[in-house]
Image (cartoon, helix red, strand yellow):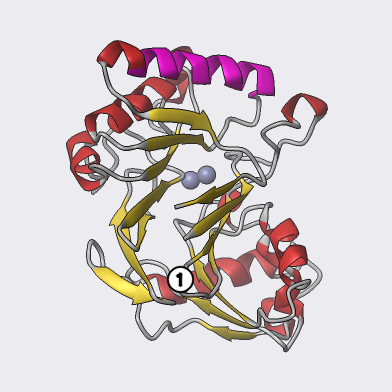
Amino acid sequence: MKIKIWGCRGSLPAPGVKMSRYGGNTTCVEVRPDTGGVIIIDAGSGLHKLGKSLVKEKDVTSVRFYFTHSHWDHLLGFPFFQPAYSNKYSLTFCSGPHAQDSIRQYLSHQMQAPYFPVDLSQLQAKMNFHCDNPCQENRNCICDGIEVRAIPINHPNGGFGYRFSENGKTFFFFPDNELGFAHPNGPDRDYFAKTVQDADLLIHDSQYTDDEYRYTRGWGHSTYADATDLAIAANVKSFGIFHHDPDRTDEELELHVETCRQRIQKSGSGVQCFAVADEMEIVL
Ligand SMILES: [Zn+2]
Ligand SMILES: [Zn+2]
């Protein structure tokens, strides 16, 4: 599968010269299974650019969306997704269990007057909010030829991370997940360590430093140290730092990546660690 990052920032888009290397767009990731098809995870501000890129591909007429949860930074790009305005496209909303109708509600709320000039009902694309093979919690389903699993996250109001698996390669995506605090019904660290064991690629929320976490604990995000320890405990091959804080400059981020690498080295683990950047492409 091919993975392309269109937005890796957390909480709020953060444009600026000091953020230009890693980018300022919020969560949006494109997955292209080897069998074909286009999968989009989350509709953060990165979706705007992805939409413009998709309309240049004449053969692409259908897209499947998976949403991790309904926080604004994961939805706000949808009204700016160009394919949604053309009847050439069909958009299917798959996502986790019980999610389909709630996704329609989230997307339509943010486009209602007086928040946005175009109502969801005016969009021209065919929108299917009833996926024929919706993911069940912790059970695999096949979507566009690729195996997908929805995994509950530990985050305010809940939500799902995803596992994509194809040709013996596994990619886990947890953009928002707090490892250091117990949210209602949220799984704990051991659960995540078992779940992502031996993954080829883990992209995980790493928003805060330990200092910042003293006042952000309970907001739903992990520290660099906690996410790195998860990658080590689970023996993943490659670990991508994600959901960069909107205040985090490129320079700061690179220092934090270095600290995570030292932590990995000290543990004796062979995990490869990097900071995810907008427009980064990964082939698994
Ligand atoms: Zn978020
Ligand atoms: Zn969130």
- At x 34%, y 72%, the residue is 98
- At x 53%, y 48%, the residue is 282
Q: Is residue 131 above or below residue 188?
A: below
Near-viewer residue (283 or 138)? 283
Q: Which residue is mark 1?
A: 102
Magenta region, residue range: 248-264
Is residue 180 visible from the viewing direction of this image?
no
Q: Position of residue 168 (x, y in %)?
A: 30, 58
- At x 44%, y 77%, the residue is 144
Q: Is residue 12 above or below residue 261?
A: below
- At x 47%, y 67%, the residue is 33
Amino acid tagged 1: Ser
Query: Under 8 Å from ligand 2: the CB of mark 1?
Result: no
Q: Position of residue 167 (x, y in %)?
A: 34, 63
Dominant SS of magenta comes to helix
Q: Judging from the image, what secondary structure is the residue with disc 1 in?
A: helix
Could you tell whether 120 is left or right of 147 in the image? right
Near-viewer residue (81 or 211)? 81
Near-viewer residue (152 or 264)? 264
Instruction: Decide whether residue 101 is among the magenta residues.
Output: no
Q: Position of residue 213 (x, y in %)?
A: 43, 20
Instruction: Decide whether residue 261 is among the magenta residues.
Output: yes
Is residue 101 visible from the viewing direction of this image?
yes
Q: Is residue 24 above or below residue 47?
A: above
Q: Position of residue 1 (x, y in %)?
A: 47, 60
Could you tell whether 195 is left or right of 89 in the image? left
Q: Residues within 10 Å of mark 1 (few under 14, many from 20)?
A: few
Give residue 164's quadrant in the image: bottom left
Give residue 24's quadrant in the image: top right
Could you tell whether 109 is left or right of 199 in the image? right
Could you tell whether 157 is left or right of 90 in the image? left
